[in-house]
Each structure stands twice: as C-alpha cells, then as structure tokens.
Amino acid sequence: MTSDFVRRRVGEQNHWYVSDQRATQLGTPGARWALEGRWSLFEHAIDAWLARGTRSGGALHVLDAGCGDGISMSVLEGMLSARGFAPLLVGSDYNGVRLARASDEGRRPVVEADLRHAPFVDGAFDVILCSHVLEHIREDVAAMRELARMTAPGGLVIVAVPNEGCASARLRNHVLQRSILRTTDHVQFYTAGSLVARLGEAGLRPIEPVMGEGLFLPHLGVYTRLRETAFGRSLITAAARFARGQAAGLVVALERAGC
C-alpha cells in the first residue's frame, strides 16, 4: 500500500486504519485472552532462540515492524528484560495515526515506514517482531526480504499471521460469511506451508516448527461471543488440541538463512 492510500483511508475514518486497537484487542476478557495466547507464543519463540546460545544478556536492538498502536511493544520489552537483556525498542508502521499512539507521547522511538522499503541498515536488529502485518501486504515476499536484511547474524525474527488458508477459514470466508472478503483489507491467506515457503524464498528459515494460536471457528460472531465466557474459552482451548491444523493464527520463530 502506498502512503497516499493510507492517508486517504485515515481521512475517510476507515475502521481498519483509525480504530483504537487497545479498545478492540484488550477491551474485553475474551479479546485479551486471545491476545495473551499469542503473546505466550512470542515468549516461547524467544526461549527457543535463547536455547541456541547465540545471546546471553546485554543490550538488544529490537524492532516491532508494523507496530500499529504499539500494544505488543511493552510486552516484548518485558519479556526480554525478564531474561536479562536491555532491549532498545523501535516501532515502525505506515500509519501515522497508529504511530502517534505507539510513541507514547514521544517517549518511545517510532518511524513511519513502508515495510517493503524499510529505512534501516543491514543487520540493524537483534530481534524483529512482525505480528499480523504480512497479510495486509500484496508484495509480501519483498517485505519478508526486508525483515531478513535487517536481522543481525544470529538474530531472531518472530512472524505471526492469521491462519486464513485453513479449511475453517475458507468455509467462513467463501460460504458462511462471504461479506468478510468484501470488507477486509487482507490480501494474503496463509497456511503454515505457504507461509514457511515464502519466508524461505525471502531468506528466513524456521528454528522450530510453526506454532498454532487458538482455534479458527468458521463464524466470527459465534467465536467472538464464545470467547467472552470462561466456559467458552475452555471449550475453544480443548477443541484446539484436536484440530491443530485449524488454528486461528500462526506464529513462527526464524533466523536469517546462511548465518
């Protein structure tokens, strides 16, 4: 997407570009539960990386690529700090409205940038998070190549995307709720296999198998209501164990190939 396209959508007050992500992603018990599940997979990815022995404390240069309102930045900072690191975080996004929120009134460094042409030097970051961003980018392999280019030797890249190529997602989008395809700004619909293949083409390789996040129910309204009750959340968690291929999201920890 071009910066002019984003500015037009912001000017139109398009929900996808101006909504308060803290309210939508943290505003209810069910929404917070879902996001915390994703964060737990980020933590697992960090621990898998540290188990390889490439880092053992000190300063870390960290990028949240496509940071949105900055919700994950403080969480990522806390995870790394708890493991003995001094994380130096930067957020980047192509949406100035979201960056203004992510900057925490200027207390956190942020950069307005197109991930396909990121303004950072080669190997600038020890850890890069790219969460629920790539599905919005038509030239996704170009963005993935930038993630690889910006990663320092021995560094970690965490990528998270919706699992919208799975059977449950196709049932929802093409049969039960076809209106979603008319309103979403997603242009990529990944499976674990297609995601890893494209990341590999870009020069990134997994350090462990792709992880599944939650369960993709084929009706958004049913899922949203179900996760708002303790019983519903426990039901989703139990069902997810038996339908691993139908996870709601995918999270993968990667390294730059050739390092």
Image (tube, helix red, strand yellow):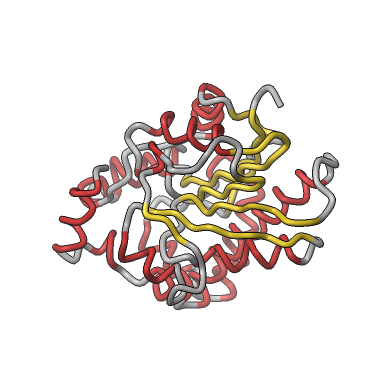
Seen as rendered, the residue at the extreme front is 121
User: Residue at 28% of width from left, 43% of height from top?
Assistant: 175
Q: Position of residue 36 (x, y in %)?
A: 60, 65
| Total numbered circles | 0
Q: Is residue 243 visible?
A: no
Q: Position of residue 89 (x, y in %)?
A: 58, 59
Figure check: 164 above or below 18: above
The quarter of the image holding the N terminus is top left
**Left or right of residue 206: residue 165:** left
Q: Nearer the viewer, residue 159 or 28?
A: 159
The quarter of the image holding the C terminus is top right
User: Residue at 64% of width from left, 48% of height from top?
Assistant: 127
Q: Position of residue 129 (x, y in %)?
A: 56, 50
Q: Nearer the viewer, residue 94 or 61?
A: 61
Q: Is residue 164 visible?
A: yes
Q: Nearer the viewer, residue 6 or 21?
A: 6
**Left or right of residue 81: residue 178:** left
User: Residue at 52% of width from left, 54% of height from top?
Assistant: 64
Q: Position of residue 37 (x, y in %)?
A: 61, 61
Figure check: 181 above or below 87: above
